[in-house]
């Protein structure tokens, strides 16, 4: 999994590319948490346009960042979730607590 970070105003935008599964989840979690803590960011945008597959470990990464930011009165959202991955979000009920947008422009 490849991550690209972009900070715009008070938001950290993380573009994820590849598979978010049990092989990559811990590394993704560590890298995102490091940037959130180092830059003291409370608003996270996760761009899923490049994610081709996600399993329950990926759900854990997203929910973990949600809880972390919630504790700081922050927020998280996801954008450009492809159909295959969107099904995982829908079945897990994550869209009930995490905002999702079709494009990055909608968030910014």
Image (tube, rainbow, N blue to C red):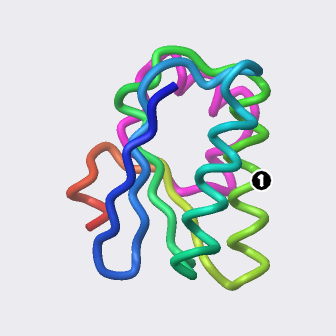
> Can you give x and y, in whole percent of width and height, for residue 59 in the image?
73, 35
Mark 1, secondary structure of its residue: helix
49 w.r.t. 103: above or below: above
Q: Which residue is mark 1?
A: 64
19 w.r.t. 97: above or below: above
User: Start and end of the magenta stretch?
Assistant: 79-99
Direction from residue 34 to residue 102 in the image, left or right: left
Direction from residue 105 to residue 43 in the image, left or right: right
Q: Residue at x 63, y 40 (%)?
A: 28
Considering every residue shown, the one lying at the far left of the view is 105
Q: Residue at x 78, y 40 (%)?
A: 60
Task: Determine crowd level at label 1: few under 14, some 14-19, many 20+ residues with C-alpha closer than 10 A.
Answer: some
What is the chief secondary structure element of the magenta stretch?
helix
> Can you give x and y, in whole percent of width and height, for residue 89 in the image?
63, 33
Q: Nearer the viewer, residue 108 or 25?
A: 25
Q: Residue at x 64, y 31 (%)?
A: 90
């Amino acid at each position: 999994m490849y991550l690209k970070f972009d900070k715009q105003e008070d938001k950290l935008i993380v573009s994820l590319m590849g598979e978010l599964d049990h092989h990559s989840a811990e590394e993704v979690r560590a890298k995102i948490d490091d940037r959130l803590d180092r830059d003291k960011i409370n608003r996270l945008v996760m761009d899923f346009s490049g994610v081709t597959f996600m399993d329950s470990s990926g759900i854990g990464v997203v929910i973990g960042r949600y809880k972390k930011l919630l504790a700081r009165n922050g927020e998280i959202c996801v954008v450009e979730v492809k159909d295959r991955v969107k099904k995982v979000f829908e079945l897990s009920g994550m869209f009930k607590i995490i905002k999702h947008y079709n494009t990055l422009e909608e968030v910014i």
